[in-house]
Amino acid sequence: METRDVPISVPALATEPRFAQRLREHLEAEQLLDKCYQLQEMPGGRVALPVLEEKLSLLSLPQEMPCGLVRIQDPIPSRASRRRAPARRLRDELRRLLGESWSEELERDVPRAWQRHGDLVLLSEDSFRAAPWEKLGPALWETVASALGARRLARRGRVLPGGMRCPSVTLLLGQDPWVEHVDNGIRYTFDVTKCMFSPGNITEKLRVASLPCSGEVLVDLYAGIGYFTLPYLVHAAAAFAHACEWNSHAVEALRRNLVLNGVQDRCRVHHGDSREVSAAAGHAPHPCRASPQLPCLCFQLELRDVADRVNLGLIPSSEEGWPVACRVLKKGTGGVLHIHHNVEALPAERGSPEGSSPDGEAQHPMEGGGKETRRARIRPEWQRWAEATAARIRGLLAELHGQPWSTSILHIEVVKSYAPHVHHLVLDLECRPTLPTEPTASSSIPPDPTGR
């Protein structure tokens, strides 16, 4: 549907200027004055004082102050109104729109939080679901957009089933689903109806941007629209990145974002399921995780021995990508894996309040050996998961290369609480071969970082 401006009108009492102050005091005393809008001069010199629509039935016109009921078209918001919190402004505008039809049920249905992407506001799934809203038609969405300072509106639904985690989003106002979001100076553009964007990961994106990656090659196995690929390239100064993604909609956004941020020449996009391995390699192909309604984009990732760093940003678990991550690490020098995982606290540990930690916590320094900027408290369950992951990766690398490898836990980062007693963690795991490799004729020639 197209965005169009619908004039707002509010009721007001119009009187001669000499009575305006006395009338204002009277309306304030009776709690009838609408303080959301300014007094306004009317044709003929009269002054109009806005009154609350829902209290019109209580209005009694004072005999000593001649006045009449009028409507102000496109009233001017008061200074106090312009300073109101957006959630309160939204509620006030909706109460004005519904007048006497306003109810507690509708007030509970008004959202108090939302996501903003440029001029588009994305509402939560459970907002404006009560039946009375439907009767308002386009006027509802135009009022909401105006109150929130937006030109377009959309509402989230449930994430569609399937490994691609496609959102179910409906445009309510406007026709163009592409939005732009800026995080830490990086521009992300994407189709809000086709791609997900998690603002809760901003702390991890900021951390990634500060990692010492100058001259390094990155492989991002679950790149999405470039959530982590871009901070590595733009701020962490990675020399080159391989971005792997299976969702065609995310790939389109990723390519746009690389251009938007001027790093398209330092990244190669691999479109398909990076977890696939070929039957010729002795493994059965992984079944495509795509939704049945979407084309299967399984492929064999041919990268080997190229990465100084591998990002595995898939939750609830990136475990199926661990063998691929081991294969793309440089076999001569190894590198660092950033492994995302949702870790649940055991029942015995749930007595500890969120944000605190029981006895036996472990602490790890930040990568690079510098002083830790935030002494993260690591719960025993998180530590056990990290140690088990390190052992599993160590075994995969030894099996792959036929020689021992060492793994060291550099850091455990708590990204966010994903659900009650479940936390999204990132393990920074350093992986190094323990025996020197024999020199070969080609050992002095470093591998092509582009994988070509």
Image (tube, grey):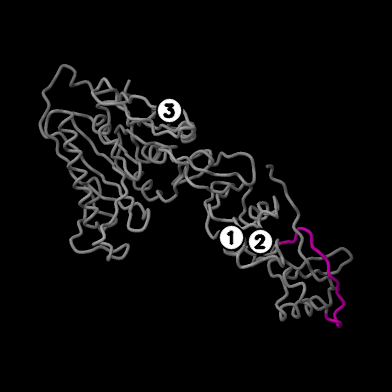
Q: Are marks 1 and 2 in contact (CB under 8 Å)?
A: yes
Type of amino acid at the residue the image marks with label 2 = Leu
Disc number placed over residue 296 in the picture, else none: 3
- Answer left or right for 120 relative to 440: right
Question: In x, y percent, where is residue 232?
Answer: 36, 39
Closer to viewer: mark 3 or mark 2 = 3
Name the quarter where the N terminus is drawn. Answer: top right
Instruction: Answer yes or no: is residue 84 visible.
Output: no
- Residue drawn at the location 45% of the way across and 46% of the way down: 183
Q: Mark 3 vs mark 2: which is more N-terminal?
A: 2
Question: In x, y percent, where is residue 15?
Answer: 84, 73
Type of amino acid at the residue the image marks with label 1 = Val
Specify the farthest residue to the bottom.
Answer: 64
The answer to whether residue 237 is above or below residue 445 is: below
Q: CA distance from mark 3 to mark 2?
A: 45 Å
Determine whether the residue tagged by mark 1 lies in a helix, strand or loop.
Answer: loop
Type of amino acid at the residue the image marks with label 3 = Cys
Q: Label 2, on which residue? A: 94
Closer to viewer: mark 3 or mark 1 = 3
- Residue drawn at the location 30% of the way across and 35% of the way down: 321
Q: Nearer the viewer, residue 224 or 364?
A: 224
